[in-house]
């Protein structure tokens, strides 16, 4: 992969006209590797065989829901997921983001909004680790090794892949290791300048990050909560 436009995209939506429109929007932007699925069954088949680099996913599908489908995809591959849904209630948006989605856009949407958000998601997911080839730190938290070049966490018994949001949050915490990083600062790093309503979502992502880097996530030793202020990464040791 030499560019985000080399990414293979999977569109999952039961509306044929919507699939055609999104396909055209993305092709005009420069994406050429696009596949489309109309339901969960077809999406599972394409996901298993095509291994897309990102998924644009509807929430309401004829044979299931996008939230459950994203969980299935993420269990197999840490692929970026962007929801494109007619469900515009805050509850659904926060549920999707809380489950680990990289973004959530409601219909109707502006074509430019879709392409800008998709490009941002792909850049965060792949540029830091694949394209820029900038040497990033490898460090230890106790017996756990964190490699920010590959976005992986290696424990005694497992090798785990960070999602794009987990990677961004952990990198921000590492850059300020030993110091408090406010919740606003972490939200800004992960979601840009629209901070309202992301506090609970941040807590969900922090909990999932602890499940990967902490020996006992319920009693964290390295990613600490500083009540009323934010979070702090401690106990960092170089390789």
Image: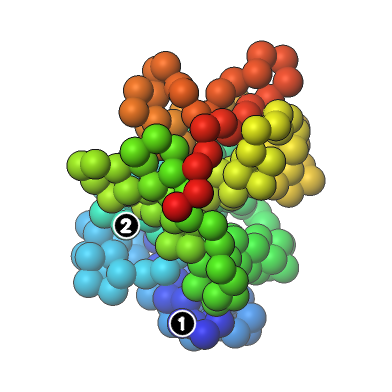
Counting from the top left corner in percent of width and height, residue 151 is at: 45, 56
Counting from the top left corner in percent of width and height, residue 177 is at: 64, 38
- Relative height, residue 58 to residue 135 (above, below): above
Whether residue 106 can be seen here:
no
Indicate which disc, 1 or 2, sits on the residue closer to the N terminus: 1
Q: Nearer the viewer, residue 163 or 39?
A: 163
Q: Nearer the viewer, residue 57 or 118?
A: 118
Secondary structure found at label 2: loop
Query: Left of 194 or right of it: where is 153?
Result: left
Q: Nearer the viewer, residue 139 or 42?
A: 139
The residue sitting at 56% across, 23% down in the picture is: 224
| Residue furthest top in the image | 227
> Which mark is on residue 77?
2
The residue sitting at 79% across, 46% down in the picture is: 193
State the image quarter where residue 181 is shown.
top right
**C-alpha distance separating marks 1 and 2:** 17 Å
Q: Are marks 1 and 2 in contact (CB under 8 Å)?
A: no
State the image quarter where residue 50 is shown.
bottom left
User: On the image, numbered disc 1 is attached to which residue?
Assistant: 1
Counting from the top left corner in percent of width and height, residue 130 is at: 50, 73
State the image quarter where residue 93 is shown.
top right
Counting from the top left corner in percent of width and height, residue 201 is at: 57, 31
């Amino acid at each position: 992969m030499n560019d985000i436009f080399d990414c293979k995209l999977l569109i999952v939506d039961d509306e044929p006209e919507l699939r055609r429109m999104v396909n055209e929007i993305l092709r005009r932007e420069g994406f050429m590797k696009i596949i489309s699925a109309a339901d969960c069954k077809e999406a599972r088949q394409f996901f298993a065989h095509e291994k897309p680099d990102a998924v644009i996913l509807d929430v309401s599908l004829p044979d299931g829901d996008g939230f459950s489908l994203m969980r299935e995809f993420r269990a197999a591959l840490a692929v970026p997921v962007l929801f494109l849904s007619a469900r515009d209630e805050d509850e659904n948006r926060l549920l999707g983001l809380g489950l680990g989605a990289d973004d959530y856009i409601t219909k109707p949407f502006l074509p430019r909004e879709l392409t800008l958000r998709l490009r941002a998601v792909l850049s965060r997911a792949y540029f830091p680790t694949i394209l820029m080839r900038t040497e990033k730190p490898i460090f230890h938290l106790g017996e756990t090794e964190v490699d920010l070049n590959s976005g992986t966490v290696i424990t005694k018994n497992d090798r785990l892949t960070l999602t794009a949001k987990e990677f961004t949050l952990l990198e921000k915490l590492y850059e300020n290791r030993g110091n408090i990083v406010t919740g606003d600062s972490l939200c800004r790093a992960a979601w840009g300048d629209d901070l309202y309503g992301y506090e609970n979502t941040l807590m969900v992502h922090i909990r999932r990050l602890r499940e990967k880097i902490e020996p006992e996530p319920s009693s964290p030793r390295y990613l600490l909560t500083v009540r009323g202020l934010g979070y702090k990464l401690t106990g960092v040791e170089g390789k």
